[in-house]
Image (cartoon, coloured by chain):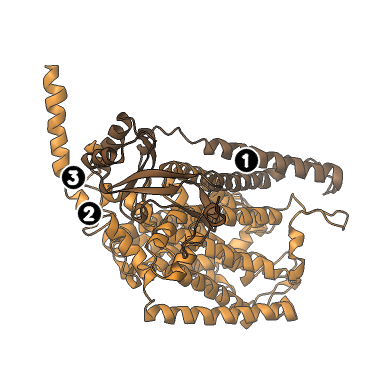
Chain colours: A orange, B brown
Amino acid sequence: MSLLKYESQIREPLVDGDKNYHQITEDIIGPIETNPSRLWYIGFAISIALLLFGVYSVYRDVAYGIGQWNLNKTIGWGWDITNFVWWIGIGHAGTLISAILLLFRQGWRTGVNRAAEAMTIFAVICAGQFPIWHMGRVWLAPFIFPYPNTRGPLWVNFNSPLLWDVFAVSTYFTVSLLFWYSGLIPDLATVRDRAKTKFRKLFYGVVAFGWTGSTKHWQRHESLSLVLAGLSTPLVLSVHTIVSFDFATSVIPGWHTTIFPPYFVAGAIFSGFAMVQTLLIIVRKVMNLQDYITIGHIEAMNKVIVLTGSIVGCAYLTELFVAWYGQNPYEWYAFKENRVNINSPYGWSYWLMMFCNVASPQVFWSQKLRRNVTFTFFMSIIVNIGMWYERFVIIVTSIYRDFLPSSWSTYYSPSVWELGFYLGTFGLFFTCFFIFAKFFPIIAVAEIKAILKTSGENYKAKMTQMEKEDAEKFYIEKVEHAH
Amino acid sequence: MAGGRKKFVVGSFSDEKVLFPAVKNVRKAGYKIHDVYTPFPIHGLDHALGIRETSIHTAGFIYGTLGTATALGFISWIFTKSWPLNIGGKPHFALPAWIPITFELTVLFSAIGMTLTFCYLCTLAPFVKKHHFSLKATDDKFVMAIECTPNTSEAELQGFLNSAGAEDINVQEAETGWWIGRYDTEQKLYRDEVGF
């Protein structure tokens, strides 16, 4: 019996300090029940300001048309689609942590999965804004869904990757939301049952859906989580695969490559983990959750960053090699002249991407740096910049010199409203996240309790003794009798 | 909606190691455990209580196949019957190009269907209110509720639970079903309000 609770001493504790079940509830639910700190208000105010700037930029997009962006006939996709792919990619880490690491039985996911899943949902909401407002005549947006209509009925083109994207992103959002919320229900019930004020009793009473913690309900809940994880795993791989199809199924040099799907997925996870680091390093500090989001968690995520960063680096070099080896003059020109040539108009962005995504994460081979919180925070920003530039390089450097040299368009830079739209999604993202951090349990309380007795620091300390006793018992019962 | 009012003897446990033998002993003694409420899933407790495996994953599979069929059926009907598009003379029935959407709809149907089934089976929805035997059941206690039959001696059962290691033992008369209600107000059952 006791050995069921055994976990090797080599593994770091996942919950630090002397904790019991009630203490975990106090630590995580406590901040919800107090007034937020000044830092929270400052952060929230900045987010709202950015959001309002974004709302105004989008208002102008609708009122004056997207002609106010600096896009032109040659560069038809610029910041807008770059930002879309970037935000979608960021979402992927949340699903990786919540679904794939659940299937792989990685205990450390419990500390970070809730926040990462929330990040996924907010990032997908932000991503969705770009294609929607890019439509220009946004009131026609429902046309992207196949519903019976009086225009024929005229249907959407099911053979188009852009439509696959509609299905992939909306499915991804829905499934992530269901997964996240079904995990939240038991924790919201915990908040409800502690609630002292009328508002909290009402609000958490409604959102906890009347959860009681019945054994049968838990059994179904476990089964649901496992199957949703099993569904989300191929789903998350499919989403960025399909996003990459937007490019890969075209015949534009620089886009028309079969390496795109795996390369996009690895890049998505890479950038997503960087964003998780950025958020969680702030959250653990501001909300005093260092015991639950430990240095061990940060190190584990840095290991994922160095792995996926190296995969991305490998993909960049493969792509370059194949462009040369494939002997297609247009493909090779796109790489050699539009990207690698640092003196070309956008050459600098290629090398910035190479530096941020390939060279810089390699520092995480050093354990000392992996466990350095300040340095990790700095690196997470670098990686996010790098991954934004990856999408920018793919999109802009592939199209700014098209097949007709007279229509080459070399100096694309965003207008203030393009920039405003991008900053606005930051505002949206952080506003959502600040509200989430204030009103919802930012760490999965029930899941932490479930791993406490195997991975809590105070319990682990007793395990050496436990192991010894069990070995002795085993020897006396099994081995001695055999002789 | 209403499960009817019944009498329960309720005891709380704070350690899984005490809970498991207690569940075994209570069942052996012939008492009927209504339910055990826990703050997190405890593996093996469902087996200890003699609850059968859930089939919710089977439901998920059925919803998934429904999604596959919907996607393939709908797209093929549109592209071969309703409005065939001539795209460079390529076949109307372009199965490989439909795989992404078919896959997405399989996952979507399965996930939504399963979650709704889960909510239905566990009666989870906004504004659903249930009786909670102990508010600690979502914090740090494993709360066992034993249903009293006309033959049960409450005092004896309380003593038995005490010897099994339970704390905070009490007798409650409770509604086992659910009703539409709010948690910020004390509510009488509808049945009690209209008086029948």
Quadrant placement of the C terminus of chain A: top left
Question: Where residue A121 sits: x, y (%)?
Answer: 53, 61
The answer to whether A275 appears left or right of A237 in the picture is left
Residue type of the residue flagged with mark 3? Met
From the image, tell me which residue sits under label 3.
A463
The answer to whether A143 appears left or right of B32 in the picture is right
Tell me if mark 1 has few (under 14), some (14-19) or many (20+) residues whose alpha carbon lies within 10 angstroms of its own. Answer: many
Q: Disc 1 on helix, strand or loop?
A: helix
Nearer-the-camera pick, B12 or A218: B12
Q: Is residue A90 above or below residue B110?
A: below
From the image, tell me which residue sits under label 2.
A457
Q: Is residue A46 above or below residue A358?
A: below
Nearer-the-camera pick, A364 or A406: A364
From the image, tell me which residue sits under label 1.
B63
Q: Disc 2 on helix, strand or loop?
A: helix
Residue at 50%, 47% in the rendered image = B177
User: Which is in the foreground here, disc 1 or disc 3?
Assistant: 1
> Is residue A264 visible to the viewer in this orientation of the structure?
no
Gap in angstroms between the C-alphas marked 1 and 3 = 45 Å
Question: Where residue A402 sits: x, y (%)?
Answer: 71, 66
Output the chain of dot 2: A
Residue at 57%, 40% in the rendered image = B60
Quadrant placement of the N terminus of chain A: top left
Residue at the far front in the pictured view: B195
Gap in angstroms between the C-alphas marked 3 and 2 = 10 Å
Q: Disc 3 on helix, strand or loop?
A: helix
Q: Quadrant of residue A88?
A: bottom right
Task: Compare marks 3 and 2 and give the one earlier in the sequence.
Answer: 2
Nearer-the-camera pick, B188 or B20: B188
Q: Quadrant of residue A200?
A: bottom left
Question: Where residue A456 sits: x, y (%)?
Answer: 25, 52
